[in-house]
Image (cartoon, rainbow, N blue to C red):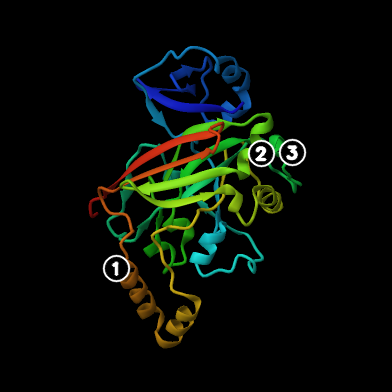
């Protein structure tokens, strides 16, 4: 049975616990990082999962701690590919990039929009939390997920589109501080839980209006094949995360491929990107100060529930 683990702050101290419907049970051990919890805490949280709640008045923190690698997949849901002008049946490669761990914040933390950013976007994503070192090419499949994965986490890959796209800066445009709400839960998977990885409903709202809704079954590059490919070119440690892409419904609306070709023929680079920013700024769905993003990922039967995020957008002062 999946177990929801939380990292919390109370009285200036940080701890870990098991989250139950009726409260949180504190773990006995002290774990300085997500990696330490994964490597040292299994007996602790298994012993506490049926205990009575014993802590309250706590602040829920990101269950993924720095240092951590946050590797991301781009354009990995069928409808999102179509929305982005990509034919999912013709795409022959997996797109990988990274976010800085400086972007980590909690499931209720404010997301700070830098003063120079105007096109701020949301991307709900399912995160796969690595449970064993990756140091060589592996063959991952649905039957051996348990050998590599510790569990799952809800993430929001917040993105500054006016940096990411004109500057072709995925890392920079997605890595400003607070641009990765994570949690509230680190959901440890056991046994049959792994079958739910491709059967989870993802939903994101802005100010109560549903913007994104899809099921992880609709990933084009499935998690097992993605982990297999990733293991051929990079190492990962326990506590690192693979974000598996976002569904359709983002604020970004790229021009159709034909329009992009025409624009490139007509305009120099500076004019092209100025017009891109002007046209995107006319769209209604980009995040504004005061907006609240809500997100959740869970299975239809409720067996897997990664919790709910509520993050407010605040404006950073001009420096």
Instruction: Give the structural element (helix, strand or loop) at label 1.
Output: loop
Disc with the residue nearer the chain's start (1 vs 3): 3
Vertical placement of residue 130 versus 74, above or below: above
Rendered-image quadrant of the N terminus: top right
The residue pinned by badge 3 equals 144
Tell me if 118 is positioned left or right of 34 in this view.
left
Q: Nearer the viewer, mark 3 or mark 2?
A: 2
Q: Which mark is residue 308?
A: none
Q: Earlier in the sequence, mark 3 or mark 2?
A: 3
Where is residue 49 shown, x and y percent of the image? 55, 18
**Rendered residue at 47%/43% (across/down):** 155
Secondary structure beneath dot 3 equals loop
Determine whether the residue tagged by mark 2 lies in a helix, strand or loop.
Answer: helix
Q: Which percent across, then down, holds residue 199?
A: 60, 43
| Numbered mark located on residue 195 in the image | 2
Determine if residue 175 is in view.
no
In the displayed structure image, the side of residue 178 where residue 130 appears, left or right:
right
State left or right for residue 119 relative to residue 129.
left
Q: Position of residue 10 (x, y in %)?
A: 37, 21
């Amino acid at each position: 049975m999946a177990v929801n683990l939380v990292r919390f702050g109370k009285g200036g101290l940080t701890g870990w616990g098991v989250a139950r419907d009726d409260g949180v049970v504190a773990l006995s051990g002290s774990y300085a990082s997500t990696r330490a919890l994964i490597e040292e805490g299994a007996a602790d949280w298994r012993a506490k999962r049926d205990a009575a709640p014993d802590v309250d008045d706590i602040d829920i923190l990101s269950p993924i701690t720095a240092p951590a690698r946050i590797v991301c997949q781009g354009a990995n849901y069928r409808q999102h590919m179509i929305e982005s002008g990509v034919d999912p049946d013709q795409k022959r490669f997996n797109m990988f990039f990274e976010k800085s761990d400086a972007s980590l914040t909690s499931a209720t933390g404010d997301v700070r929009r830098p003063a120079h950013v105007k096109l701020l976007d949301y991307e709900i994503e399912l995160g796969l939390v690595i449970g064993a070192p990756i140091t060589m090419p592996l063959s991952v499949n649905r039957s051996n997920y348990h050998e590599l994965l510790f569990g799952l986490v809800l993430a929001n890959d917040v993105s500054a589109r006016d940096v990411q796209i004109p500057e072709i800066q995925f890392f920079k445009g997605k890595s400003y501080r607070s641009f990765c709400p994570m949690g509230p839960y680190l959901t440890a998977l056991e046994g049959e839980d792994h079958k739910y990885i491709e059967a989870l409903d993802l939903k994101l709202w802005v100010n109560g209006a549903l913007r994104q809704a899809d099921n992880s079954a609709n990933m084009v590059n499935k998690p097992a094949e993605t982990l297999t490919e990733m293991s051929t070119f990079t190492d990962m440690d326990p506590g690192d995360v693979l974000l598996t892409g976002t569904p359709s419904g983002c604020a970004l609306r790229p021009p159709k491929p034909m329009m992009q070709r025409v624009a490139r023929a007509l305009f120099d680079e500076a004019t092209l990107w100025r017009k891109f920013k002007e046209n995107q700024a006319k769209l209604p769905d980009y995040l504004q100060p005061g907006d609240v993003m809500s997100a959740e990922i869970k299975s239809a039967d409720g067996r897997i529930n990664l919790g709910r995020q509520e993050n407010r957008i605040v404006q950073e002062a001009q420096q």
